[in-house]
Amino acid sequence: MEALHVLIAGPAGAGVFATSNMLGKTLLRHGYEVFITNEYPSLIRGGQQWALVVASAESPVYSHRRRVDLLLALDKQALGSNLSKLGSEGLAVCDTADKGVEDPRVVPLPFREAVKELGAPTVSINTVGVGAIVGALGGDVELLKSAVASQFRSREVAEVNVKLAEKGYSMGVELRRRVRFQLKRLSSSRRLLIDGNSALALGLLAGGMTAFFSYPMTPASPILHFLAEIQREYGIVVFQPESELAAINMAIGAAYAGARAAVATSGGGFSLMVEALGQAAMTETPVVIVNVQRPGPSTGMPTHTAQSDLRFVLHASQGEFPRVVLAPSNPLEAYELGCEAMNIAWKYQVPVIVLSDKFLAESFWTIPDLPRLEPEEGRVLRGEVQGDYARYRLTGDGVSPMAVPGTRGALVYANTSEHDEYGFGTIDPAVVRAMQEKRFLKLRSLRAEAERKGVKVYGEGQVVLATWGSTTMVAREALRELEGVKLVQLVWLEPFPAESFAQEVSGRKLLVVENNMRGQLVSLIREHVLRQPEGFLGRYDGRPLDPEEVVEFVKMHMR
Amino acid sequence: MDERVYDTKKRPVWCPGCGNFAVLTALRRALAELDLKPEEVVIVTGIGCHGRMSDYVRANAFHTIHGRTLPLATGIKLANPNLTVIAHAGDGDAYAIGLGHLPHAARRNIDITLIVHDNMIFGLTTGQVTPTTPQGVKTKSTPFGNPERPLNPLLLALASGATFVARGFSGEADHLKELIKQGILHRGFAFIEVLQPCVTFFNTYQLFREKVYKIDGSHDPTDFEAALRLAQQEDRLPIGVFYRVERPTLEDYFAYAMSPPPALRKPQAPDLSKTIERFR
Ligand SMILES: Cc1ncc(C[n+]2csc(CCOP(=O)(O)OP(=O)(O)O)c2C)c(N)n1
Ligand code: SF4
């Protein structure tokens, strides 16, 4: 696959992400498949960050590569520390004043001068830079201008930036013969370039969410920001309370009242929510909990990525109860599973946890339009109830019709202590057993759902590479270079789709790759299908795996 | 309405003479006199002896975990402001493990009523110290006397911006009933601290009977300074309404989402087309 890799680097506050967004949009509007990922420290000022923009005309870009064709450096340090990533044929552009090294690949351009001429603030050299990159790539200047304009809310600022981009573009045109990858306008359908967090938020909305409570925690906060921004358009309650303890209890209260509610956090906030997770299960109140993972233990690395909360969310809380854990790998799945989480929670009146991670949450992928999804109401009673109502009525499948408070003819008693069918507290051994069995009866239907939808397969071969979450995208990228390898993604992690998984891996060599140290999926496989994988590759330095290391790992095991 | 409408006919398992009985009766009578239908009322209770209230009041109810009555009740009210939401907490519930929620419920002025059954002791766990146990008192966990100064809940509520602050006493059930009625009718966060002796682990009936007196008409409940002064009295304990003002509630802020409120909407696929334009 022929692809273009552009690295944008600079100090925090220099607009690295805005730049990658403008470039990404320009490429998207040319009709390219685009992928953007980034790395930054947990600082507001100081410290270096970068964003990688990958584009391809031929096929979807699943993830990053250890490769850079073009580098846009927004200061001297960014140039110095990223030059080593640039290929020998590559090209680096920076402001004239930032060229600290003698290297034939580095082309200094008068970014600051252009900014001065237009009387714009110095930080806007990034817009000149993005213009230069598009110019060098032979892109369409009108598409560049439209992408730049859409980045800024104020019309005045947008106009100045469009001019800056044009200036940069003419500087870049001079470099065309030095850049092999030249852009064309492709005739492809209108698509979206979207990040995992936004897609998940839209999925929750598609699932009928009307109340959202969240205490900010990186990398989950953008979900809160996005929903807060659009809350009035959708007539939903979006609220930031005093803690994650409050957030989840508010969500449970809202759901008990009849509103579809969700919370989002990262591992540290989930730790606080554990207390109420059991309450959601015991009171059979539907609630969706999004955990956007980052490395732990404790505060760990706030702005980095990991898949190390799997075992935690599977077992969190005292006692035994059914729960559902879903893990999307890309924005389209995040959108679909956001809606599905809501539907499953309400259909079965159980807590549903969606496990995302920083790499998925803050990277952008090109996807076709979002499919229309439908929220399913589940067994909710509204209006009027006839006869004797009991919130925890024993039923054939463990799901009791849920009346909302205010319904004529029904009094709804939810109880976090063990209770009888009506909700009254009990310690009667027979009732306790019946209630515990009732709650677990739901597992039967949930297992069937997991077996049906919990496993996705890519490719075919005698070697299986198993993974989950965003690492699936890295593995799909690796798959391009591997023959005879079948990729198996676990979308449902609880209930574990044991039969479907066993079927996919039976008689094949089994390798596992995950973004953690101890092999949490590996241990689940041992537990559920009684198999010890032949190989495991884990990464635990806060970075996603690179496709290159996955290729190497699989090849080593195929020899 | 007949107060028996609010009786689940379950026999309370409190110790004979427990201060909780009076709160139960006062609540049922208040609801009956306000003519509220059980379907319109939600009782939220925490964990502790007081938490059994939800077994005995015939209405909608949520018996939640220790300390979380306020956020839970807030969630219910935000989802459906048509409901009358009354939260019951113990002093351990409200002032120890759940204290982090109280100032916030007060300052955000969510339209719910909080009734704190303050027996100055952990009842259900058989008599340990709480944040309102007087200094020096011997409890199971402070056998040599409580080393800490107690918290003043009324000052805390006032300082946090509660728009209705009152104190009642189990020994004055009729007076308490009136306070609960006023609290429910108040638009905004109503904080009612109830002196509720625990006859088994810290019997304060005698003490309170001597110290308690009713706030009379000379007190102006809109006078914040006067309320602060009343709340600081320790030698004698005033009961009644300390403070009352009107301010916008949290639900008012979400008015755009309330017709119909989130809880009463049948889930529908929203039209996302406008929002996703930004990703093109
Ligand atoms: C997280 C948690 N910690 C501890 C307990 C044990 N516990 C149950 S009730 C209680 C204290 C009850 O005291 P209070 O809130 O004053 O209510 P009372 O019993 O006096 O009415 C405690 C500590 C619990 N249920 N949950
Ligand atoms: S222990 Fe105290 S608070 Fe609990 S029921 Fe007995 S008297 Fe009442």
Image: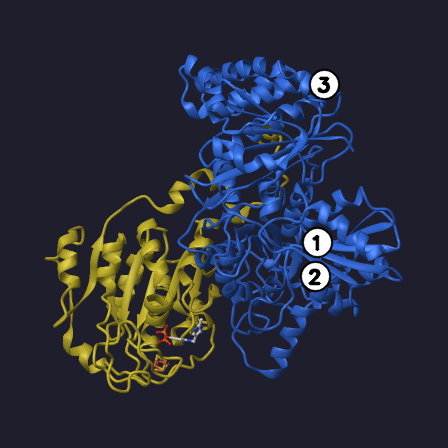
**Which residue is outermost to the front?**
A102
- Three-letter amino acid code of the residue under disc 2: Leu
User: Color of chain A here?
Assistant: blue
Residue at 32% in and 70% down:
B91
* Residue at x 78%, y 29% (from the top left corner): A58
The amino acid type found where label 1 is placed reads Trp
Judging from the image, what secondary structure is the residue with disc 1 in?
Answer: strand
Specify whether disc 1 shares its chain with disc 3. yes
Discs 3 and 2 share one subunit = yes
User: Which residue was labeled with disc 3?
Assistant: A185
Image quarter where the N terminus of chain A lies is top right
Pointers 1 and 3 in contact (C-beta within 8 Å): no
Q: Quadrant of ligand 1?
A: bottom left
Q: Which mark sits nearer the N-terminus, 3 or 2? A: 3
Question: What is the C-alpha distance between the residues marked 3 and 2?
Answer: 43 Å
The answer to whether mark 3 and mark 2 are in CB contact below 8 A is no
Subunit that carries the residue with mark 1: A
Q: Which chain is yellow?
A: B
Label disc, if present, on residue A521 of the rendered structure = 2
Calculate the distance from the C-alpha at mark 1 to the C-alpha at mark 3. Answer: 35 Å
Q: Are marks 2 and 1 in contact (CB under 8 Å)?
A: yes
Residue B192, quarter of the rendered image = bottom left
